[in-house]
Image (cartoon, rainbow, N blue to C red):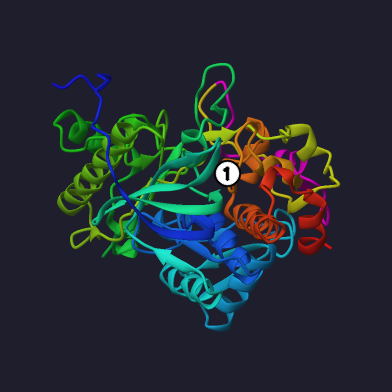
Amino acid sequence: MTNLYERMSIPTQDISVIGDYDVVVCGAGPAGIGATVDAARSGARTLLIEYLAHVGGMATSANTMSWCDTPGGPVFDELVERLKRIGAAEINYMPERYHRPGRVRFHAETVKITALDMILESGAKILFCTVAESAWMNEGKVSGVFISNKAGRSAIKASVVIDATGDGDIAASAGAQFHKGDPEDGRLQHVNFRFSMEGINAKEFKQDGPPEEVLLEMIKVAQKEGKIRPPRGLFSPAAETFPYDLVNHRMNHGYWEIQGVDSTDPLAVSETLCDCHQAAMDMMRFYREQLPGYEKCRVGKLPTVLGVRESRRILGHYLLTRRDVLDARKFEDGVARASFWIDFHDSPPGHTLPYSLDYVKATRPAEGDWYEIPYRCLVPKEVSGILVAGRCISCDRDAQASLRVMPTCFFTGAAAGRAAAISVSQGILPHELDGQQVRQVLLG
């Protein structure tokens, strides 16, 4: 086998520069959508680069299906209203658990198209099926990005680059410092694999299915015979009873949590996806052969990507902390609001689901209040010409467990887009911009 850590030199390569923009946004997830729409509407010539064939990121690729109860900013609010008007989103508000306005359940395929409409209406351009490889450094600053697609490798110039990759790929490639995982042992929050199983007659299974103890023995035998292969690193449901969830006393064929997966490691991601795909097929075969009501079941929609919660956290000019979240702290350069609780999906010695209502309330601002994310969290230290947005902004691990959720990513994306546009219009670099200018136009 080839040594994966072997180093080699490649010949000097002449590549084409295929574009020159005011703002280039890398990644079309929630942060990228927010950044692109706000930058373009603010007058910047904007390009969005996305390696998939659609926009939406985790919202449309990981089968997440809902947005959490926290402010999302102007682009998010408009998107939700557009979706509601066509029956593609609904608000679920539980006053004892959710902040207003509640959680938004959405139709993912419609999100792809509606968000795309907003991007194109803003005047921005999109480059799909293209990987933003790394930062193009020129005269000591980020001056664009190298990209790769079916046309080969090329470069795009930009006055400002916004890293909305989720993992901070572009900022890290430019030399930005970052933290990753728990400071003690490096562990990362679990990734999700969400999929659907179709063709199940739940009523028949409830009526004629085996009792729990018999079902568990059937699963034990199937695992021993290699007919059910739990994914490596499976945290929930427990591998020993997979696919049965002994905590909730039900079959779990839609939501698995995997531990120990670094989303910046392509081999780990690929192995996990392969394991989960095979496990889904194992389940289907076992169900069809063994369980009444499942004779005609089949694998439904598989996720395009793993549901990632945590990877790099780019070190910026301010590090948002757990204390800032709990104290609902406000900042003179605050450019985004958030109120979600500190939601870890972690392995021991960390915390994970289920969480009591008391814990939820104790780890978030009070109803009607919020904490703010300062502009400085979006500005990497020691690297100029680039902003970060989304779950990879500058924060400690506890704060990231709150601000990682998608509405907050929309909000920090919009802030980065507005800051980039203002910087371009004023002929300055993002780190030279006074964050209060962004605050004034976004938060008032």
Q: Position of residue 214 (x, y in %)?
A: 28, 39
Q: Is residue 388 visible?
A: yes
Horizontally, is 429 left or right of 282 in the view?
right
Q: Position of residue 271 (x, y in %)?
A: 27, 35
Viewer-side residue, 223 vs 70: 70
Say whether residue 108 is magenta: no
Q: Is residue 251 visible?
A: no
At horizontal 54% and vertical 36% (from top left) the residue drawn is: 345
Q: Position of residue 287 (x, y in %)?
A: 22, 51
Question: Please, is residue 226 above or below residue 162 in the view?
Answer: above
Quarter of the picture containing the C terminus is bottom right
Query: Start and end of the magenta stretch?
Result: 349-372
Viewer-side residue, 5 vs 291: 5
Viewer-side residue, 410 vs 80: 410
Please, which residue is most extreme toward the top here? 184
Tell me the residue that label 1 is attached to.
391
Horizontally, is 311 left or right of 226 in the view?
right
Q: Amino acid at mark 1?
A: Arg
Decide whether the magenta segment is chiefly helix, strand or loop.
Answer: loop
Say whether residue 362 is magenta: yes
At horizontal 35% and vertical 57% (from top left) the residue drawn is: 52
